[in-house]
Amino acid sequence: MSVRMRHTVAHTRNRRSHHGLNAASLLKCKKCNEPVLPLTLCMNCGTYKGREIIDTLKKLTKLERKKKEKEKELSARGEGKEKASGKSLDAAELSKK
Ligand SMILES: [Zn+2]
């Protein structure tokens, strides 16, 4: 093995000072307020820039679909309590899958 240039603890630490990771910057979906990555469609409601790109209900079973449609209606109708309850249901559903 060739002899490398001398390196010190300070050199190592200086190099590693750039190795830190930043938290991903998340935006909120305009339709359902779920956190989404920028420039990607929302996997919760399947919309991007206000347009529906994919049908998120297609893959679900009949029962799940009914649940989700109800949630959509609730979130479309009003905000506040109903929206919060819908969100918690979404999280539970996602964890099941
Ligand atoms: Zn969404």
Image: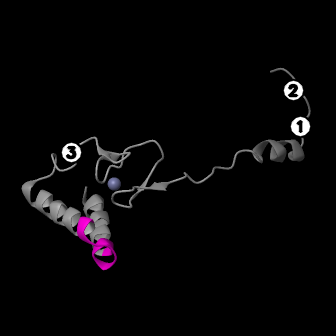
Q: Residues within 10 Å of mark 1 (few under 14, many from 20)?
A: few
Mostly what secondary structure, the magenta segment? helix
Q: Is residue 72 left or right of residue 50?
A: left
Residue at the spot of label 1: 7
Relative height, residue 93 to residue 39 (above, below): below
Contact between labelled residues 3 and 1, with CB atoms less than 8 Å apart: no
Relative height, residue 55 to residue 72 (above, below): above
Residue placed at 27% from the left, 72% from the top?
78
- Under mark 2, the amino acid is Arg
Relative height, residue 62 to residue 7 (above, below): below
- Under mark 1, the amino acid is His
Contact between labelled residues 2 and 1, with CB atoms less than 8 Å apart: yes
Q: Earlier in the sequence, mark 3 or mark 2?
A: 2
> Which is nearer the eye, 68 or 91?
68
How far apart are the alpha carbons under marks 1 and 3? 57 Å
Asked if residue 34 lies in the magenta stretch, the reply is no
Q: Label for residue 4? A: 2
Where residue 96 sits: x, y (%)?
25, 60
Indicate the quadrant containing the N terminus: top left, top right, bottom left or bottom right. top right
How far apart are the alpha carbons under marks 1 and 2? 8 Å
> Residue pushed farthest bottom?
81
Q: Confirm if mark 1 falls within 8 A of ligand 1.
A: no
How far apart are the alpha carbons under marks 3 and 2? 58 Å
Magenta residues, start to end = 76-84
Residue at the spot of label 3: 55
